[in-house]
Image (cartoon, rainbow, N blue to C red):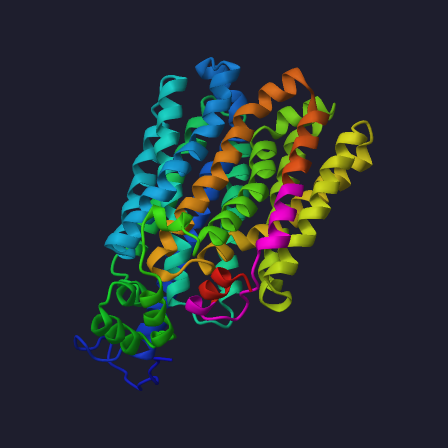
Amino acid sequence: MATTPVTEQNEPSTPPGAPATERERKRLHTKLKLATQIGQGIDGYIIGGIGLAMSAITDDLHLSSMEQGLVGASPLIGIFIGGPLFGRLADRFGRRPVFLMDMLIFLIGSVLQFFVADGPQLILIRLVMGVAIGGEYAIGAPLLSEYAGRLGRGRLLASLEISWYLGYALATVVGALFTSVDGGWRWSLASSAVIAVVCVALRGGIPESARWLLSRGRRDEAEALIEKYGIEVDVEAELDDRDEVRQDGFRALFSRQHLRSTVFASVFWAALVLPYFAIGTFWTEVFEALHMGDNAVAALLVYSFTAVAGVTAGCLVVDRIGRRKLLIPPFWITAACLALVAVWPSSTPVIVVGFLFFIFLNAASSALTAVYPLEVFPTSLRTTGVGFATAMSRVGAAIGTFLLPMGLDHFGAEFVLLIGAGVLVVGALVSQFLAPETTDLDLARAARTAREGA
């Protein structure tokens, strides 16, 4: 284990190559954590901001039902492109440049949303922003994990999902404030530019990942970083992993060595987010179909903050109860919740309790989307694997978001909710057979455990 003791220095800066002061180390870790958490928060903000704005956008831009579906689904389609693209770039060229580049795309896209004149323009801009969201998933959590120690890593990474849900909830609040303003949806969507500016400033000066340097055979540079910042890295395990994992790129994901991890990460993530994104994007329409449209706005605010409570609970227990226990039982319970609402759609208590349990437990398990995917792939393939899993998760979410308004029109809310329950059952079954237990393992050893099916 290559670490270095803390050196007692009071100087504001250190010469090149010298160990950093304790203050500099804490400053780097704080800066990296904030830059990653805010990036995750802006993802949730962009996805969540469309919920209350959709009706006004439809009226102002005269959207058809198909265009409504595409406005909701376009960021998810963009994630399908951006996750694998940015993930591969980060594995090939390094974490640092990709970490900054995708946030610049967020900033430009946020501003452009204010000036759209029709539906196709908005769809295109949100598609490009979705590409950046995919990049954020592929690089943000993996980079943070590569600086984190093995103990408490789950809680640290799961906290990124709290940021996502807080961003989603904040977007809902901002959207509610602008609902009565003429053209307020433009201000609501463009407000994400403020967050992006802060995040771009934070990301300047963050160094490269020592684990990535080891995966590229640049041991001297990696060990210099490890010594300077006191990073906890099992150097020998990383080097052994590099010797064992000789293949990289997208083809490696489907080799016998990594197929298990690829299938698990993709399916469990997709099964978690499909019902959440689809129902959340068209929450008002779902509640109207259940004859509770007068309560839709208040319910969406409750929905958002219940999700924050759920993901916070998941963050607090992820290192205590283990990954599998946080994932598998909630899958079965949330499937039952949606099925109950579908079977008794006329019962207000069933609707309220069923959705609250679904939201809380789905969000709690969603804490693992920032943990599991990056733990089951080796460093040389980590961002490629996470990017691909991100893309696959959004394929289902995009399809569900696109089809949900048409499903409501043709088959009703009960059918849509039963489909959501079926998706959650698939996630439960796949996780039961493929999910490894990686709690408290070094990243290199966690990836090996996943490959061996332990």
**Residue 313, quarter of picture:** bottom right
Q: What residue do we see at 45% from left, 46% from top?
A: 389
Residue 42 image point, x, y percent: 43, 44
**Residue 300, quarter of picture:** top right
Q: What residue do we see at 47% from left, 40% from top?
A: 392
* Magenta-highlighted residues: 425-445
Is 428 a magenta residue?
Answer: yes
In this view, the residue in front, 264 or 71, is: 264
Q: Is residue 145 left or right of residue 21?
A: right
Residue 27 image point, x, y percent: 34, 69
- Numbered label tally: 0
Residue 185 in the image: above or below residue 367: above
Chief secondary structure of the magenta span?
helix
Is 220 a magenta residue?
Answer: no
Q: What residue do we see at 31% from left, 67% from top?
A: 243
Q: What residue do we see at 48% from left, 43% from top?
A: 44
Is residue 191 visible in the rendered image? The answer is no
In this view, the residue in front, 376 or 175, is: 376
**Residue 391, quarter of picture:** top left
Q: Is residue 290 left or right of residue 99?
A: right
